[in-house]
Image (cartoon, grey):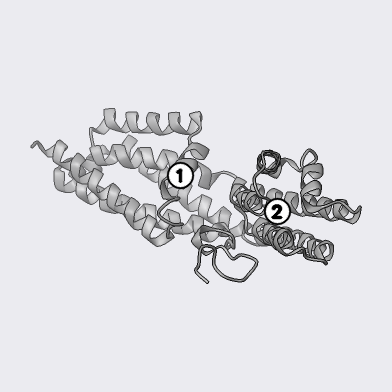
Amino acid sequence: MTAPAAAALLGAAAGLGLVLACCGLRGTTGPGRRWPLLAARIRAGASLPRTAGALLAAGIVAVSTRWPAGTVLAALAAWYLPPMLGPDRDHARTTERIEAIATWTESLRDTLAAAAGLEQAILATAPAAPGPIREPVATVTAAIRGGQPLPQALRALAAGIADPVADLVTAALVLAAEQQARDLGQLLSSLAASARDQAAMRRRIAASRARVRTAARIIITVTVALTAGLFAFSRAFLSPYSSAAGQLMLLAIGACFAAAFWWLGKIARPGPGTRVLTGPGTVTARGRPEGARS
């Protein structure tokens, strides 16, 4: 086996090890949902400009250096770094989704106050559901019209929105559907107010972390610019990385920088909340985990 082939094989093994380590640190959501969730994330992030940028960066480094490790690191950098350098779109989407949940909850409350049943209220408010949650609500209404039991359809709604605030609202609706709760309107009012408070809190957190995000962008930009400058103007300084041992060292250095950049991104962005209605531990109206024996 030639030295470049061995370096490429070792680089692929190191990359797989890093991916598995990150998956272990992040945790999983159950064996039945790992691969569908991963596929959904890949589809959500696989935009054409992002893919083209990663392929272009990998091609430039491969042609100019013939380093397998450098090619892999360049592709990963071109794939993951642009979202970190740009605006925090995930936070904006999360905040809009929480406000949409609050608006739809208030609409449900007002419709229920007009002496409508819960199922009729969901069907009536679905066409006017806010944009961020319109598709999951429409899917659930189609399931209800198709004869699916209401509690099961509501749990599917929680899975479709995939938000902790939606889990709380859905849990209240499930309890009302299974036990005929009397004070559902008051409970929905409290949940809607709590959702709006949480959206406002996330805005305050994002404003307080603006300085941290700016510092992270400066650090990442300077590091990438310095690396590109070395490739362009000081190739002799990087010549030791041409050997197989140098490729392994380059992978180790790239892993250290990747861990540092990941940590900067984690500090600069608030993490998602803990969901309630997820996996086999979903709580039913009787207070036992779903599927538990009596």
Residue 201, percent from left and from top? 71, 63
Indicate the quadrant where residue 230 lies.
top left
User: Can you say whether 211 is above or below 93 in the image?
Assistant: below
Q: Residues within 10 Å of mark 1 (few under 14, many from 20)?
A: few
Q: Is residue 223 visible?
A: yes
Tell me the SS state at disc 1: helix
Q: Which residue is mark 1?
A: 36
* Circle 2: residue type: Ile
Indicate the quadrant where residue 89 lies.
top right
User: Can you say whether 95 is above or below 239 in the image?
Assistant: below
Tell me the SS state at disc 2: helix
Q: Is residue 229 visible?
A: no
Quarter of the rendering occupied by the N terminus: top left
Q: Which residue is mark 2?
A: 98
Indicate the quadrant where residue 241 lies.
top left
N-terminal label among 1 and 2: 1
Residue 167, percent from left and from top? 64, 58
Which residue appears at 76% of the width and 43% of the height? 130
Q: Residue furthest front?
A: 294
Instruction: Please state which of residues 241 and 32 is positioned toward the viewer in this rendering.
Output: 32
Q: Are marks 1 and 2 in contact (CB under 8 Å)?
A: no
Which residue appears at 62% of the width and 53% of the height? 155
Which residue appears at 61% of the width and 58% of the height? 211
Residue 195: give its label: none
Residue 220 shown left or right of residue 240 in the figure: right
* Circle 1: residue type: Pro
Q: Residues within 10 Å of mark 2 (few under 14, many from 20)?
A: many
Question: How many angstroms separate mark 1 from mark 2 (CA)?
Answer: 24 Å
